[in-house]
Each structure stands twice: as C-alpha cells, then as structure tokens.
Image (cartoon, rainbow, N blue to C red):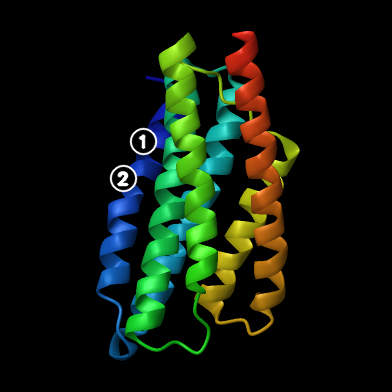
Amino acid sequence: MTLANKITIGRIFLVPVFIAVMMYYSPQREYMRWIALSLYLLAQAADVVDGIVARYFHEKTRAGAILDPLADKFLFISALLCLYRVGVDHDWTLRMPLWLVVAFLSRDVILILGGVLLGLKSGLPEIRPNAWGKCTAFLQMICILAIFFQCQPAFFVWWIALLATIISGTVYIKEGIRVLNDGRY
C-alpha cells in the first residue's frame, strides 16, 4: 500500500462525508454548503497530491491506476447529483440544469461501460486520459464550483463544458473502438 494509494483511498472515504453534508444542507444551515465545498476542494487537492506523490516517489501502481479514476468519478457524480438535488429542493437562484447533468452523467456511464467492455475482451485496460478528457474534467469542475458559489455567468461555462464533454466522449469512444478492433492498448 503506497502513500499515493492511501491518499486515493482517503479521497474515496471523503465522498460519503461530502454526500452527508450536502444532504443536511438547508437555507437555515447555510454553513453546510461551505463545509461541503471545503470537502470537495480537499478531495480535489488530494487528487493533485496523490498524483505528485505517485510520480515523484515512483509509486505508480495497478491499484492506483484503477482507484484514482474511480475516486474522481465518485466525487464528480456525487457532487453533480447532490448539487442538482439541493438546487431544486431549496430553489437556489442558480441550479445545474437537468440537461447538463444528463449529458455529464451519460458521458461517464458510456466511458465506464466501455472500460468494462474492454476489460472483458482484453483484460484490465490502462486508462490514459487525453487532453480533451483533462479539459472536460476541468470545465466540469468549474461548473460545480460555479453552482457552489452561485456565479451567475455560469451558463456560459455550461455550454463550453457541454461541448468539451461531447468532444471528449467522442474521442474516447473512437479510441475504444480502435482498441476493440486492434486488440491492443
């Protein structure tokens, strides 16, 4: 168990705490939004730290290659769904639109199912994020932060994030099809 893997597992354990805090949010307990935001940012910072530790100390492991993207997806999907629910339930001025939630989740579900399909065909795939995937993740994180902070110009970022989501999903699907046809990663 490397230090990088321990940090990643810590990120995974932060997700249910984040969800619990978000579920206890109400306008009377506004501080819960700020606690949830702090947990979200802590998990994002830990993601950066575990990546640095893995590279600097040469701690890249097969477990880390699986756990790190899982931790990312758990946090992202949890934040997306919790913020959508809280925004609707408490009539926030700025809410994540349902169409954007569906688009973001659809891409992730397709990528996860594609990874499972590749795993069944050829063993565990090595997940290599590309520039479009990293750009999409960054823009999606900006969308989540905009909701936390209730930033009004967020709708502009939503459309850019949607476009990046579609492009990165298409790129990953094409790569998955190529791998399925070639049988190589």
Q: Please, is residue 88 above or below residue 130 in the view? A: below
Instruction: Find disc 2 in the rendering and name its residue.
Output: 13
Q: Quadrant of the N terminus?
A: top left
Viewer-closest of 102 and 64: 102
Image coordinates for residue 87, horizontal then vertical, percent = 41, 80
Q: Is residue 185 visible?
A: no
Q: Amino acid at mark 2?
A: Phe
Q: Residues within 10 Å of mark 2 (few under 14, many from 20)?
A: some
Q: Residue at x 36, y 35 (%)?
A: 9
Whole-angstrom CA distance, mark 1 to mark 2, is: 6 Å
From the viewer's perspective, is 160 left or right of 86? right
Q: Secondary structure at mark 2?
A: helix
Image coordinates for residue 178, horizontal then vertical, percent = 66, 20
Viewer-closest of 124 and 67: 124
Q: Are marks 1 and 2 in contact (CB under 8 Å)?
A: yes
Give the residue furthest to the front. 181
Q: Which quadrant of the figure has residue 54? A: top right
Q: Quadrant of the C terminus?
A: top right
Image coordinates for residue 78, horizontal then vertical, percent = 38, 57
Q: Which quadrant of the figure has residue 26? A: bottom left
Q: Is residue 32 visible?
A: yes
Q: Secondary structure at mark 1?
A: helix
From the viewer's perspective, is 56 left or right of 20? right
Image coordinates for residue 92, horizontal then vertical, percent = 44, 87
Instruction: Find disc 1 in the rendering and name its residue.
Output: 9
Q: Amino acid at mark 1?
A: Ile
Q: Residues within 10 Å of mark 1 (few under 14, many from 20)?
A: some
